C-alpha cells in the first residue's frame, strides 16, 4: 500500500520502498539466528536469509532500487561474530553486489563488530542513526541525538511490532505490522522485523511499559496505526487503541 | 509361521526337558506346573521362539526362565559356562526388573547349592561356576557397570533404553557373542507404542551385530490380536514373519464379575445419597474381603476415594493410595505393604494395573468404566493371586451410559472378546535414532541397513523412499555444505550409497538423547521445608491460588506459592480440600467395545419395541418378561437392570430411534435452558474414530456456512455448536455428511490439525525423538518450556524447507494414526457410502435421553459437578414432560452451607475435558 506518494509499504512484506531515495528499507534481520540455535542443540534449518533474499528480489521487480537500507540488527549475536553470521552476512553482501545494490547499515544493538566489514566490503555503516534526505533512520534502541531541520520522516526498527488477533473460536494469531504515527510533528514509521522467525511483540496486547524502545516514553503507541502484513497483503487495521479491543478472546 | 498351541505337553514331557537338578528344585518348590509352564518348559528347551500370554500369578517368570536356567546349569556342569551374557531379559518397568532380580537370585542359589551338596565340593573347585544375574538400567551405578564389563552376568536384566545403549557400546558387545535367549516381558506394554517400536529395532540390530539368532521369548498379559504381538516379538525375514509358537494361557483364570449401579434411579436420586450408597458398598467390600483393590481411572479419583473412606469409616493407615504422581518411595512402600498383607485396601488410578507382584488381592472394584475389555480383564485379573483362583471383580457405574458400557464390557470379557491393539507402523522418528545408532556401529551400505530395519515388524512395510528421506535428513542434506558439520548426524556418500559415523559428537548425542518418552511438564510439589511430596500437572497449578487446599497422596496440602517448575505447600490441618481435583486423564472408549455396545443397543431396543409395555418402571418386578430375560443373561445387578431398561424405554418413546452400530443418529436439537442450538451425532465407534470423524464433519460444515464450528467429542458421540447467527439446516447437514463420505479426508484433516495445540506439542515430541531438538547437548539440558518455544520456530522452518520433511510427516502420521484413528474412520465412511452404516436425522425440541451425557460434557469446562447434575435432571425432566409422564421433583440439595462446604462428586471419571 502507498503511505504517501514516495513511500510504499510492499504488499505482504516487511519492506518499505522509498522512491525518492531509490531504496528498500528493512530492519532486524538477525542473520545467523539458526546457526546460533543449532549450537544449543536446536537444529533449525537456515531459511531466514533465503527468505529475505527472495523478498528483496521480488520487491525489486518493477521498482527502481539502488540501495538497501538496513535499519539495525542485521545479525543476531551481541558479543561477537559467529561463524554462521559471518557466512550469512557474506552471502547477503554478495547478493547485494550481484544486484548492484549499495548496502547501508545503521548499527543496532546486536551489531557489534560489523565495522570490520566496512573496509573489505565497502559498506556504509552508521552508528545508531543516519540522515538521508528528508529521512532520519535510526535503529531505535536509543533516541536519535538530535532531529535536524528538514527531517520529515523518521524510520526505526528494534521493536518488532506485531498485533495479536483472536479468531472466532478463540485462537490467537499474531501478525507482523508497521506502526505509523507522529513524533514532534514528524512522521514516524516503525518497521517490523524482517527475520523469518521473529513473531514480534503484540503491541495491542502488551502493556505499554513492556515496550522496548525509549521513543514510546514520548509517543503514545495507542495513537499509532498498525499497518498489518500477512497473507500477501498489507492493510491499515486502524489505531492500536482500537485493536486492543480485538485482543480480548471472544 | 505363527502357530497356536492349545494342547499342553504332559508334565513328564515338560519336566524331563529340564536338567535333573533344576527339575528336582522345581518339584520340591512347586506342587504342579501352571498352564503356561506346561507349554514353555519344553518349547524353550527346544529353542523355539515362544509368545506366552498369561495372567498374574501363573508363574510366568519361571515359565520363561526355567528352561534357560536349566541350559545354563548344563553348561556349568560341563565346564562350558563363560563370563558371557547368554540371556537378556527386557522389561519396560524398572520396578519389575528389580523384582525379577530378587526372584531369580534365590532359585539360582538354591539350585547351585543342591548341585554342590549332591556332587560334593570336590569336582566343583576348578570349574563348576555359578549362574549369575545382573541388572542394568538407568539407575545402575558406574561402578556396577564397570564390574559388568569385567565380569558379565549370564543373565542380564535390563530396559529397552539401556539395551539400546548397550548395543552401541563396543566393549559390552564383546560379552554378547554367546547370546542365546532374549526375553521380552510385559509385551502388551510395548507392542502398541513407540517404546516397543524402538525395542523392535534394537533387537534386529542386536541380532545382526552378533551374527546369530537368539531364541525370542515374549511374556505378557492378554492382548488381541495375539498374532500381531507374536510378529512384533520375532520380526520378519524374507518378507515373512519368523517362526513363533503362541500360547494363550491368559484364560486359565476364571472371572466372576458384575456390573453394578449403587441405586435404581441414577437421575433423580440425591447426589449425596448416591455417594453414600457408593461408599457403603465400598466399605462393605473392604470389610468382607481380606484385601480389596480399587481402581478409579484418575489420580484425582484415587485421592478422593482414599480421603472419603478414611473420613467416613475411620480407616487409618490400612488404606493407601498408589498412583504415578506419588514418589517412588511411597509407591514401593504401598507395594510392600500389599505383598505383606498389611493393607485392607489399596486405591489406585492405573499404576497397579500391571507389573509388580502385589500379593493376594481378594476383590477388585472398578469405579467408572475402564473403557476397554482388555483393561477390565487386566485389572480384575489382579484378584485371586494363583491361577486356580477365581478373579472376583465388580464395576460400579454412576451414570446410565456407563452402566450399559460396563455391562457389555464384562459380558465381552467373559466371552473373551478383547479389543484390539495396533503396532505403530513406520515411525520415522524412532527409526532416525536407530540409523544414527547404526552409523556409530560401522559403515553401512544403505541397502543392507534398509534390510535390517525391515526385519523389525513395525517397519516391515517401510518404503525405501522414506528410508532414504531419513538418511538425507540425518546427513544434513537440507542445509548447505558448510553447515552440515552441525546439522548432520551421519556421514553419507551418495555415490557409493554408504553411510557411517560423522564426527565425535554423534556418539554423545545418541547416548544422551535416545528414547521415546517425551519430556512433559510436571510440577514438583515441595513443602516449604523443601521436602518433595509429589507431582501435579502444570494445568492444575494454574488453577491454584495461595491458600487453596488440595489432596495429594491422600494428604491435604495448602498451596503457598510457586517458583518456576516448583509448587510450595504446607500440610493443611483442616478436614476438606477447597479445590476441585485434577483434570482427569480420561481413557478413550475402544473401537471394539463401542461396536459391542452398538450391537447391544440394537438387540435390546428391538426387544423393547416388540413388547407392549411402554411404562417407565420403578422396581425390577415391573420389568416385562422378555426384557428381563435378555438382561438377566448379562453380568449386571438389579439396580443396573432397572436403570438400563428405563434409559432405553425413554429413548424409544421420545425419539423413536436408538443409535446402534449400524445407525448413526444425527439429532438437531436445542437446549431449553440456554436456548442454544446443538447438533448431536450419536456415533458409537470409539472415541478415536469420533475424534477424527467429528473433525471431518466440522470442516465440511464450516466450509458450507463459512463459520467456525465448535466440537465436543466423547465416547458416545459428538456435539457441534455454531455461532448464534447461523442456523444449520438438516438439508445442509445432510450435504455436509455426504460431502465427507465422498471427500479425501486425509488432506482436509492435515490442514485442520496444523492449527491445533496438539500439533504443536506432538511436533515437539517427534522433533526431540528425531534428534532435531536435542534435550541433552554439550552438557546443557534444554527445559521443556524452551523445547516448546524452539519447536514452534522449527516447525515453521521445516515447513518452509520441505512439506514432506520426515519429522513433519511423522508428526502427522502419529496424530492421524496413533492419536486419532484415520484408518477406521475411512473404513466407516466407506461403509456409509455402501449403506452398511446408515444415518438418520431427527429434529427434537429438547435433547433426547441418549444425548444428555454428551450435553453435560459440553458444559464440562464451565459448570461444576453439582450444577452439572442439576442440568442433567432438568434435561431429563423436559423429556418426561414432553412424553406426558410425571416429572419427579428435582432433588433439593441437603445441608445448609453448600456454597462453602465443598464435597467431592461421587464418581471418579465424571469430569472430562
Image: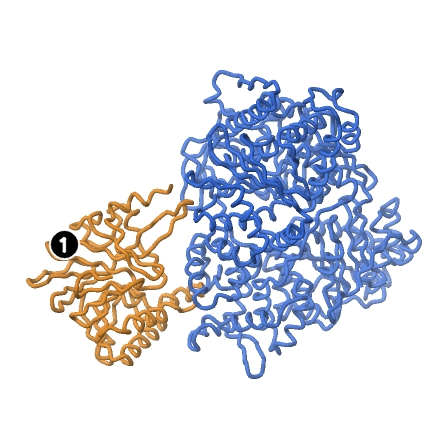
Chain colours: A orange, B blue
Q: Nearer the viewer, residue B465 or B706?
A: B706
- Disc 1 is placed on an element classified as strand
Local crowd at mark 1 within 10 Å, few (<14), some, or many (≥20)?
A: some
Describe residue B795's horizontal placement relative to residue B427 as left or right: left
Rendered residue at 27%/52% (across/down): A237
Residue A188 lies, in percent from the top left, at: 17, 57
**Above or below — where is B358 with respect to B154?**
above
Residue B166 lies, in percent from the top left, at: 63, 64
**Above or below — where is B911 with respect to B245?**
above
Rendered residue at 46%/32% (across/down): B558
Residue B734 lies, in percent from the top left, at: 56, 46
Describe residue B290's horizontal placement relative to residue B327 as left or right: right
Rendered residue at 10%/62% (across/down): A151
> Mark 1 = which residue?
A183
Residue B839, located in which quarter of the rendered image?
top right
**Above or below — where is B377 with respect to B431?**
above
Rendered residue at 32%/45% (across/down): A246
Amino acid at each position: 500500500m502507498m503511505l504517501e506518494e514516495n513511500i510504499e509499504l510492499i504488499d505482504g512484506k516487511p519492506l518499505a520502498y522509498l522512491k525518492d531515495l531509490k531504496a528498500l528499507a528493512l530492519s532486524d534481520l538477525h542473520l545467523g539466528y539458526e546457526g546460533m540455535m543449532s549450537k544449543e542443540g536446536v537444529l533449525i534449518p537456515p531459511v531466514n536469509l533465503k527468505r529475505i533474499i527472495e523478498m528483496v528480489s521480488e520487491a525489486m521487480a518493477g521498482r527502481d532500487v539502488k540501495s538497501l537500507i538496513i535499519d539495525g540488527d542485521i545479525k543476531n549475536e551481541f558479543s561477537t561474530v559467529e561463524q554462521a553470521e559471518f557466512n550469512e552476512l557474506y552471502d547477503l553482501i554478495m547478493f547485494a553486489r550481484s544486484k548492484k545494490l549499495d548496502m547501508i547499515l545503521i548499527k543496532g544493538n546486536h551489531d557489534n563488530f560489523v565495522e570490520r566489514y566496512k573496509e573489505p566490503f565497502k559498506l556504509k555503516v552508521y552508528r545508531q542513526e543516519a540522515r538521508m534526505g528528508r529521512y532520519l533512520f535510526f535503529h531505535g534502541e536509543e533516541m536519535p541525538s538530535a532531529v535536524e531541520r528538514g527531517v520529515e520522516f523518521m524510520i526505526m526498527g528494534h521493536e518488532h511490532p506485531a498485533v495479536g488477533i483472536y479468531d472466532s473460536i478463540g485462537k490467537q494469531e499474531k501478525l507482523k505490522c508497521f506502526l505509523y504515527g507522529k513524533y514532534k510533528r514528524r512522521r514516524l514509521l516503525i518497521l517490523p522485523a524482517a527475520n523469518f522467525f521473529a513473531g514480534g511483540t503484540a503491541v495491542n496486547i502488551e502493556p505499554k511499559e513492556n515496550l522496548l524502545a525509549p521513543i514510546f516514553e514520548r509517543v503514545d503507541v495507542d495513537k499509532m496505526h498498525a499497518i498489518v502484513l500477512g497473507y500477501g497483503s498489507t492493510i491499515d487495521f486502524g489505531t492500536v487503541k482500537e485493536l486492543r479491543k480485538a485482543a480480548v478472546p471472544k | 509361521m505363527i502357530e497356536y498351541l492349545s494342547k499342553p505337553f504332559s508334565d513328564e514331557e515338560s519336566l524331563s526337558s529340564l536338567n535333573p537338578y533344576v527339575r528336582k528344585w522345581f518339584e520340591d518348590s512347586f506342587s504342579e506346573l501352571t498352564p503356561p509352564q506346561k507349554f514353555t518348559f519344553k518349547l524353550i528347551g527346544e529353542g523355539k521362539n515362544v509368545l506366552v500370554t498369561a495372567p498374574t500369578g501363573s508363574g510366568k517368570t519361571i515359565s520363561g526362565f526355567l528352561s534357560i536356567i536349566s541350559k545354563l546349569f548344563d553348561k556349568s556342569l560341563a565346564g562350558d559356562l563363560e563370563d558371557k551374557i547368554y540371556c537378556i531379559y527386557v522389561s519396560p518397568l524398572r520396578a519389575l526388573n528389580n523384582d525379577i532380580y530378587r526372584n531369580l537370585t534365590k532359585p539360582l542359589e538354591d539350585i547351585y547349592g543342591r548341585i554342590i551338596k549332591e556332587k560334593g565340593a570336590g569336582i566343583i573347585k576348578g570349574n563348576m561356576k555359578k549362574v549369575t544375574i545382573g541388572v542394568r538400567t538407568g539407575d545402575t551405578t558406574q561402578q556396577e557397570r564397570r564390574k559388568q564389563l569385567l565380569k558379565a552376568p549370564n543373565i542380564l536384566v535390563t530396559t529397552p533404553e539401556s539395551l539400546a545403549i548397550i548395543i552401541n557400546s563396543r566393549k559390552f558387545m564383546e560379552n554378547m557373542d554367546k547370546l542365546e535367549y532374549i526375553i521380552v516381558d510385559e509385551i502388551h506394554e510395548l507392542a502398541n507404542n513407540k517404546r516397543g517400536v524402538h525395542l523392535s529395532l534394537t533387537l534386529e540390530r542386536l541380532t545382526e551385530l552378533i551374527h546369530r539368532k537368539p531364541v525370542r521369548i515374549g511374556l505378557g498379559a492378554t492382548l488381541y490380536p495375539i498374532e500381531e504381538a507374536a510378529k512384533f516379538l520375532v520380526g520378519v525375514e524374507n518378507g515373512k514373519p519368523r517362526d513363533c509358537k503362541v500360547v494363550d494361557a491368559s484364560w486359565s483364570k476364571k472371572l466372576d464379575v458384575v456390573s453394578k449401579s449403587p441405586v435404581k434411579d441414577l437421575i433423580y436420586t440425591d447426589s449425596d445419597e448416591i455417594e453414600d450408597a457408593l461408599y457403603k458398598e465400598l466399605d462393605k467390600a473392604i470389610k468382607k474381603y481380606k484385601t480389596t483393590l480399587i481402581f478409579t481411572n484418575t489420580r484425582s479419583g484415587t485421592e478422593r476415594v482414599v480421603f472419603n473412606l478414611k473420613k467416613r469409616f475411620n480407616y487409618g493407615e490400612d488404606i493407601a493410595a498408589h498412583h504415578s504422581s506419588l514418589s517412588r518411595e511411597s509407591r514401593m512402600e504401598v507395594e510392600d505393604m500389599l505383598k505383606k498383607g498389611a493393607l485392607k485396601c489399596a486405591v489406585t488410578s492405573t499404576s497397579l494395573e500391571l507389573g509388580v507382584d502385589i500379593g493376594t488381592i481378594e476383590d477388585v472394584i472398578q469405579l467408572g468404566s475402564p473403557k476397554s475389555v482388555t483393561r477390565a480383564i487386566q485389572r480384575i485379573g489382579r484378584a485371586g493371586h494363583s491361577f486356580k483362583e477365581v478373579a472376583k471383580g465388580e464395576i460400579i457405574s454412576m451414570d446410565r451410559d456407563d452402566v450399559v458400557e460396563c455391562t457389555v464390557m464384562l459380558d465381552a470379557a467373559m466371552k473373551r472378546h478383547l479389543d484390539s491393539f495396533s503396532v505403530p507402523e513406520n515411525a520415522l522418528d524412532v527409526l532416525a535414532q536407530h540409523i544414527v545408532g547404526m552409523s556409530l556401529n560401522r559403515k553401512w551400505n544403505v541397502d543392507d541397513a534398509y534390510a535390517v530395519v525391515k526385519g523389525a515388524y513395525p517397519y516391515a512395510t517401510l518404503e525405501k523412499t522414506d528410508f532414504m528421506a531419513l538418511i538425507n535428513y540425518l546427513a544434513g542434506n537440507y542445509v548447505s555444505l558448510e553447515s552440515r558439520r552441525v546439522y548432520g548426524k551421519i556421514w553419507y556418500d551418495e555415490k557409493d550409497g554408504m553411510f557411517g559415523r560423522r564426527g565425535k559428537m554423534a556418539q554423545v548425542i545418541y547416548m544422551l538423547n535416545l528414547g521415546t518418552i517425551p519430556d512433559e511438564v510436571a510440577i514438583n510439589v515441595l513443602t516449604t521445608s523443601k521436602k518433595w511430596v509429589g507431582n501435579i500437572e502444570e494445568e492444575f497449578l494454574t488453577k491454584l491460588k495461595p491458600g487453596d487446599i488440595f489432596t495429594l497422596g491422600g494428604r491435604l496440602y495448602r498451596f503457598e506459592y510457586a517458583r518456576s517448575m516448583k509448587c510450595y505447600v504446607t500440610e493443611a490441618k483442616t478436614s476438606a480440600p477447597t479445590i476441585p481435583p485434577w483434570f482427569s486423564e480420561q481413557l478413550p472408549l475402544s473401537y471394539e467395545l463401542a461396536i459391542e455396545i452398538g450391537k447391544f443397543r440394537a438387540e435390546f431396543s428391538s426387544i423393547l419395541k416388540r413388547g407392549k409395555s411402554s411404562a417407565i418402571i420403578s422396581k425390577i418386578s415391573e420389568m416385562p418378561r422378555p426384557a428381563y430375560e435378555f438382561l438377566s443373561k448379562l453380568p449386571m445387578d438389579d439396580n443396573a437392570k432397572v436403570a438400563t431398561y428405563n434409559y432405553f424405554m425413554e429413548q424409544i418413546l421420545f425419539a423413536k430411534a436408538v443409535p446402534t452400530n449400524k445407525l448413526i443418529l444425527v439429532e438437531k436439537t436445542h437446549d431449553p435452558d440456554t436456548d442454544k442450538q446443538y447438533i448431536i451425532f450419536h456415533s458409537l465407534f470409539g472415541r478415536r474414530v469420533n475424534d477424527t470423524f467429528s473433525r471431518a464433519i466440522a470442516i465440511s460444515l464450516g466450509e458450507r456456512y463459512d463459520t467456525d464450528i465448535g466440537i465436543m467429542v466423547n465416547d458416545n458421540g459428538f456435539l457441534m455448536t455454531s455461532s448464534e447467527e447461523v442456523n444449520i439446516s438438516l438439508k445442509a447437514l445432510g450435504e455436509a455428511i455426504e460431502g465427507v463420505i465422498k471427500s479425501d479426508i486425509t488432506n482436509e484433516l492435515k490442514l485442520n490439525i496444523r492449527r491445533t495445540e496438539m500439533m504443536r506439542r506432538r511436533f515437539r515430541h517427534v522433533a526431540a525423538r528425531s534428534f532435531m531438538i536435542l534435550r541433552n547437548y554439550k552438557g546443557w539440558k534444554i527445559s521443556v518450556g524452551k523445547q516448546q518455544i524452539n519447536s514452534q520456530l522449527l516447525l515453521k522452518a521445516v515447513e518452509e524447507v520441505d512439506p514432506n520433511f520426515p519429522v513433519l510427516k511423522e508428526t502427522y502420521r502419529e496424530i492421524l494414526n496413533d492419536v486419532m484413528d484415520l484408518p477406521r474412520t475411512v473404513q466407516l465412511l466407506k461403509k456409509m457410502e455402501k449403506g452398511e452404516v446408515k444415518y438418520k436425522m431427527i429434529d427434537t425440541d429438547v435433547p433426547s435421553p441418549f444425548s444428555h451425557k454428551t450435553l453435560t460434557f459440553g458444559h464440562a469446562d464451565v459448570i461444576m459437578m453439582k450444577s452439572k447434575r442439576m442440568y442433567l435432571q432438568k434435561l431429563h425432566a423436559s423429556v418426561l414432560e414432553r412424553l406426558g409422564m410425571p416429572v419427579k421433583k428435582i432433588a433439593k440439595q441437603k445441608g445448609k452451607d453448600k456454597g462453602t462446604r465443598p464435597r467431592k462428586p461421587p464418581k471418579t471419571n465424571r469430569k472430562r475435558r
